[in-house]
């Protein structure tokens, strides 16, 4: 009687273990896919503003895999905005005094603080190019006091650098 139970139990156990391992692999791959999607989203949003990225996603979903010769250009006209360019004075001297790792860490910390200020002052970072920080007020939504927001942003940036 025990031999019959053994012959029934063992194949069932093998199948259950195999199913468990396959399910585990599936869950691990799904988690990996979610992480990769988050990375992809972060990369996209580091290049494009959220409202444009959303438009691109919508158009790609509708478009599907149809081959088109020309792609849509995502341009919007904004009549009243303020642009702030902030360049760090003496950056070349600073760069020659620090090693690359220290310099990158310094700029990352500084620009992270600028991003926080931009959010607080209703500004949107457009680009970082070397030691230059570009942001705009009045985008993506109209801001009636855009100029004041940009000036306050600039003054607060000066305070952060001190």
Image (cartoon, rainbow, N blue to C red):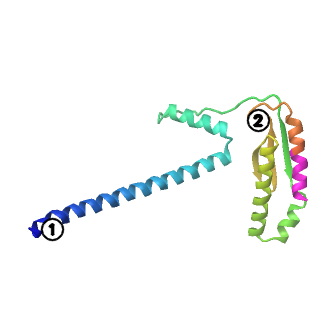
Mark 2: secondary structure: loop
Q: Secondary structure at mark 1?
A: helix
Q: Between tags 1 and 2, which lies in front? A: 1
Precedes in sequence: disc 1 or disc 2: 1
Circles 1 and 2: CB distance less than 8 Å? Answer: no
Quadrant assignment for the N terminus: bottom left
**Mark 2 Cα shell of 10 Å, populated few (<14), some (14-19), many (≥20):** many
Number of marks: 2
Q: Is residue 78 above or below residue 43?
A: above
* Identity of the residue furthest to the left in this view: 1
Residue 96: image location, x then y, percent: 84, 69
Question: Is 50 one of the magenta-colored residues?
Answer: no
Left/right placement of residue 57 relative to residue 85 reads left
Q: Which residues are magenta?
A: 153-162
Q: Which mark is residue 139?
A: 2
Q: Label for residue 6?
A: 1
Which residue is painted at 77% across and 50% down in the image?
116
Comparing 83 with 116, the one in front is: 116
Q: Residue 65, percent across and down?
A: 47, 36
| For residue 134, side relative to residue 62 (left or right) | right
Which part of the image, by quadrant, shows the C terminus?
A: bottom right
């Amino acid at each position: 009687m025990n031999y019959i139970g053994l012959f029934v139990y063992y194949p069932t156990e093998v199948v259950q273990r195999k199913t468990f391992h396959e399910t585990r692999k599936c869950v691990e791959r799904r988690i990996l896919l979610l992480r990769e999607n988050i990375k992809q989203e972060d990369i996209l949003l580091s290049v494009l503003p959220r409202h444009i990225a959303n438009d691109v996603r919508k158009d790609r979903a509708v478009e599907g895999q149809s081959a088109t010769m020309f792609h849509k250009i995502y341009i919007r006209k904004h009549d009243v905005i303020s642009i702030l360019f902030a360049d760090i004075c003496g950056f070349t001297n600073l760069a020659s005094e620090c090693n690359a790792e220290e310099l990158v860490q310094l700029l990352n910390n500084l620009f992270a603080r600028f991003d926080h200020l931009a959010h607080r002052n209703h500004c949107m970072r457009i680009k970082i190019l070397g030691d230059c920080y570009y942001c705009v007020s009045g985008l993506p939504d109209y801001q009636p006091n855009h100029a004041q927001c940009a000036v306050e942003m600039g003054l607060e940036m000066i305070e952060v650098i001190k």
